[in-house]
Amino acid sequence: MASFLTNGLERYLPRHAIPLYVEEVAVGAHPARRFHGHTFMEIVLILAGEGEHLVGESSTEIRAGDVLLIHPGISHGYDRTATLGLVNLVYDPHKLALPQLDGQRMPLFDRLFMPWQTITPELIGRPLLHLETAETAALGGKINRLATELNSNRPGRNFLSTAIFMEIVAELCRSGTASEEPAVSEFLIGDAIRYMHDHLDEPIEVEKLPDVVSMSRRNFFRRFRNATGCTPGEYLRELRFHHALELLRRTDLSVAEVALRSGFCDGNYICRLFRERLDTTPRRFRAACRTDNPGH
């Protein structure tokens, strides 16, 4: 592993911008075997060439037309990059306010908006789907249009950028190779997830969440896993962890206070999570963020 870096989305964004960012990497320009992770979701469209996608101990052949989906906290990199050209579309699903409506009826929608902890590195390493040449060109054009709008100063920039992003998501979900079974819209599960967000710094008893949305325990836990791919407890831990990342990055609160405000029992537990997830400590993580963003 040549190097490892954890990036937060805010390092790429101006103040008050929506949590969307596009970065195109020209053919042959991506460093080989430079491992990195981030606290946001990343859609990667391979525009040209071929190479290897490295996640954990797995290595997967990738080529033009492949679409990758990288989850928060995952360390990944590329090898054999001489002919590889790609574009990254990064976003924070927890902070990007989108009307989901009947989106969950589309294949892959939950994968794009409900990052879960239990997905394996091997699965993340493999392409989410593969697009034909015309589809790749069309999607690349939409992503380029999004980048242009995000970089403009025109009135309604954020509004239109959000609309273009929703169109990109719909195109991916409707792709002929999007083979996952469509999920039934789970509006009550969405209410439970919003409850977690709104009460993050309070004790939340997972066993009582079914009562919050007036569902039976068995039905709630089954539908929650269908909607998110994980258990409510796993989702809540992931949510708390990413809130702790934000507090460390943006405030001068002590590690103990960050733990409390994120809903963790104490600083020792959050330190253990950081060692397990990022192979570092909260203090070192904060110091690295300050080094990368001295103005924050």
Image: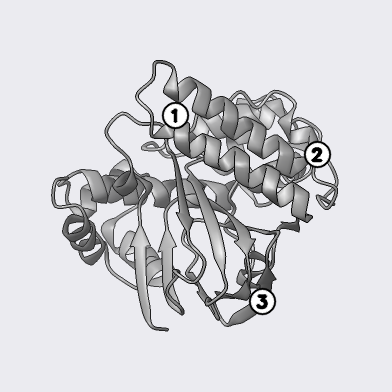
Q: CA distance from mark 2 to mark 1?
A: 25 Å
Is residue 82 left or right of 105 when viewed as pictured?
left
Q: Which residue does the image show at 39% across and 15% down from the upper left?
A: 155
Foreground pick, 212 / 90 = 90
Q: Which mark is residue 60?
A: 3
Q: CA distance from mark 3 to mark 2?
A: 28 Å
Residue 95 shows up from this direction: no
Q: Secondary structure at mark 3?
A: strand
Closest to the camera, between mark 3 and mark 2, is 3
The quadrant holding residue 151 is top left
Is residue 274 left or right of 251 when viewed as pictured?
right
User: What kind of residue is marked 3?
Assistant: Thr
Is residue 71 left or right of 1 when viewed as pictured?
right
Who comes first in sequence, dot 1 or dot 3?
3
Which residue carries the number 2 mark? 183
Whole-percent x, y for residue 71 in the image: 54, 56
Q: Which residue does the image show at 46% across and 78% down from the upper left?
A: 32
Most distant residue in the top direction: 155
User: What kind of residue is marked 1?
Assistant: Asp
Report the coloring of the rendering. Answer: one colour
Callout 3: few (<14), some (14-19), or many (20+) C-alpha neighbours within 10 Å?
Answer: some
